[in-house]
Amino acid sequence: MFKRLQWKMVVMFVALVFITMLIAGIFMVSNIIDVYQEAFISQQEEAVNGDLIVSLKNALSSKGTDAERITKATNSISLYAGKMGLGAERDCYILDAKSGKVITSYNNKTTVLEKTPNIISAMAGKVGKKFSFDSNYMDYANNFSVGDKEYIIYVKDNRNAVNTLVGNMLSIIMQALLISTLVSVFLCFFFSKTITKPITILTEKAEDFAEGNFESRLEIVSQDEIGTLMETFNYMGGVMNTALSEVAGEKHKVEVILENVNSGIVAFNTDQQIIHVNGAAKLLFKDLLTPDTRFDEFWETFGIHLPMEDFMYLNKFRTEERDIEFNGSHIKAYIVPFKIENDKVAGVVSVFEDVTKQFNLEESRRKFVAEVSHELKTPLTTIGTYTETLLDGYLDDKEMATSLLNTVHTETYKMTALVKNLLTLSRYDAQKEEIQKELFDLGELVRDTVATFKVEADRKALRLIYNLTTESPVILGDRFQIERAIKNIISNSIKYTDAGAVRIYCGYVYNEAYIKVEDTGRGIPEKDLPHIFERFYRVDKARSREMGGTGLGLAITKEIIESHGGSISAESEFGEFTRFTVNLPLAKED
C-alpha cells in the first residue's frame, strides 16, 4: 500500500518538476526568438530612419544609365551593411513597388522573391514588419519614392542563427530536465519515506486494535502532526480498553434486539426511557414514539396495564404476549426483559409483529365461506321449493311442471357455474391450475373473441368496435385461459352498457402487449372501484344476480392474467365510462 503511495508521490513530484522546467524552457525559447525579432526590426528601422533612404534616393535619381544608378544604390546598401547586420544569412533588396520585382540586392543572389505579407504591405504604402512564430524567416519592408517612381527596401533573414541558438538552448534544457528528474526522484523517495514509515506503524497499531490488543503503545518519532497522531492513537487505545468492559454489558441487549430485527423493536431501560427504536417500529407507531415516551405510558396508550416494576421486582423473566390494534393494524407484541452480567434486569425489549395480513386473510376466509353459503342457499331453496311443489300435485299439469322444471334447471345451471368458478379459483390459490403455454397471435385472438359478441351487441343496439393499434403482438401463454379472461371483460362491458359503444384496442408498447376494453356504460362508483376484483363483490348486487352473475368473473380474470406474469387495472367515471386495461409480456425472441 505505502509503496504505491511512495510511487504516487514520486510521480507527482517529478511531473511537477518536469512541467515547470518545460514551461520555463518554452518561455525562454519564445523569449529568445522575440528578442532576436525585435533586434532585427530595430536594426532595419534605425538604418531606414537614418541616411539610408536619402542615400538610395540620391543614387536612384542621379544622372547616368539605369545600370549606373542601380550600382550606386547597391553601393549605398553596402555602406549600411554593418548597421543592418547584412551577411550570408541576411540580404537586402531594392524592389519595384508596383510589380514587386527585384531591382538589386546586397548579395546579388536572388533575382525573384515570393510576395510575403510584409512586401504586400509595403506595396500598399505601409511598413511591413509583421512576424510569424512558425515562419522560417524574418523580413522587413519599407516603401519610398524617387520622383514619380516607388521603390521598396526589403531585408530578409533566414533565421539560421536564431535556430542554431534555439537548438543549443533546447539541448541545455533537456540536460537540465534529465538531471533535475533524477535529483527529484531521489529527494522524493527520501522525503516520502519520512511520511510513509509512520503511516505503516499506525496501520500495524490499527490492526492490533482490530484484534482486540489495546495494550501496546506507539513510540513517538517526531513532534509534528504525525507525532500528534501517534499520541492520539495511544490515547484512543486507552479509551477503547476502558470501554471494552462496558461493551460486554451491552452484548446481551444487542443480541436480543438482533434476533428480532425483522420486526418492530423498542427497547426501554429500567428508568422507562427509550434506548433503541428500529425502523420497523417507527413505521408501525410513527409519532407515538418520542424521546419523552415512558414505558408505562406507552402500553397505557393501547389500554394495557404493564408496569416496569413487574419486571424489575417480581422476577418476570418469561416473555409476555399482547394483542394490539393501532391505526387499523393488528399487531402481536412480545415483551422480553434483558439482564446484565449480575442477573439484574437492565430493561425491557418489546418486539412487535404486524399480523394485519394474516388477520385479513382469516377475515376474508370467513367472509368467503359466508358468501359461498349465501350464493348456494338461494338456488338450493328455490330448487327445494319448486321440487316440493311438483311433488305436491303439479306433475300432471304439464305447463306448470315445465315452468317449474325450467326454473330448477336455471338455478342448477347457476350453481354449476358457481361451483366451477370456485374450483377454478381454488386451483389458482393452490397453484395447481395447469397452463398449456403456446405461442399465439394475441391480436387475432382478440379479434375472434370480439366477433363472438357481435350478436349480443346488436341485440342491445350497441356498436362493438375493435382496433389493432400496432402490429399484432405475439405472446406465450394458455390461449384458452387468455380468451376466457377477455370474454369476461367484454361480456361485463356489454352487460352493463345500455347505449353507445364498446371499444376494444390491442397492441404493444416496448416489451408488453396490452388489451383495453372501454365502454360508455353506467360506470363504477369511486368507492367500489378498489374492490371489483374481489371475490363475490358486486357493484349492483340485485341487478348482477338478475343477470346471472356469480361475482367471480373478474376475480378469475385477475388470477388468469397474473398467472401469465401480467397485470389488470380498471378506470371509471360514474355515469360516463369504464375502461379495463390488461398488460401481458410479449414472447421473447430466441
Image (cartoon, rainbow, N blue to C red):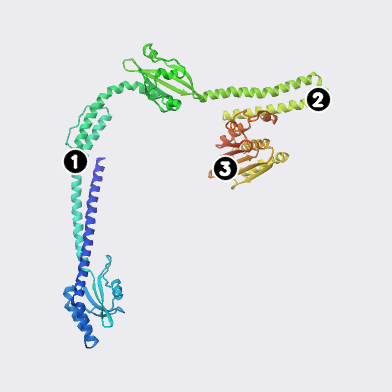
Query: What label sits on residue 194 in the rendered view?
Result: 1
Tell me: residue 68, above or below residue 505: below
What residue is disc 3 on? 513
What distance separates the C-alpha of mark 2 from that of mark 3?
53 Å
Q: Earlier in the sequence, mark 1 or mark 2?
A: 1
Secondary structure beneath dot 3 equals: strand
Which residue is depicted at the point 18% across and 44% down?
Answer: 190
Q: Earlier in the sequence, mark 1 or mark 3?
A: 1
Mark 3 surroundings within 10 Å by alpha-carbon count, few (fewer than 14), some (14 through 19), many (20 or more): many
What distance separates the C-alpha of mark 1 from that of mark 3?
68 Å
Instruction: Answer yes or no: is residue 12 visible.
Output: yes
What residue is disc 2 on? 400
Residue lying farthest to the bottom in this orientation? 64
Image quadrant in which you'd find residue 57: bottom left
Q: Nearer the viewer, mark 1 or mark 2?
A: 2
Q: Residue 454 location, x and y as percent?
A: 70, 41
User: Does residue 359 appear left or right of residue 522 in this picture?
Assistant: left
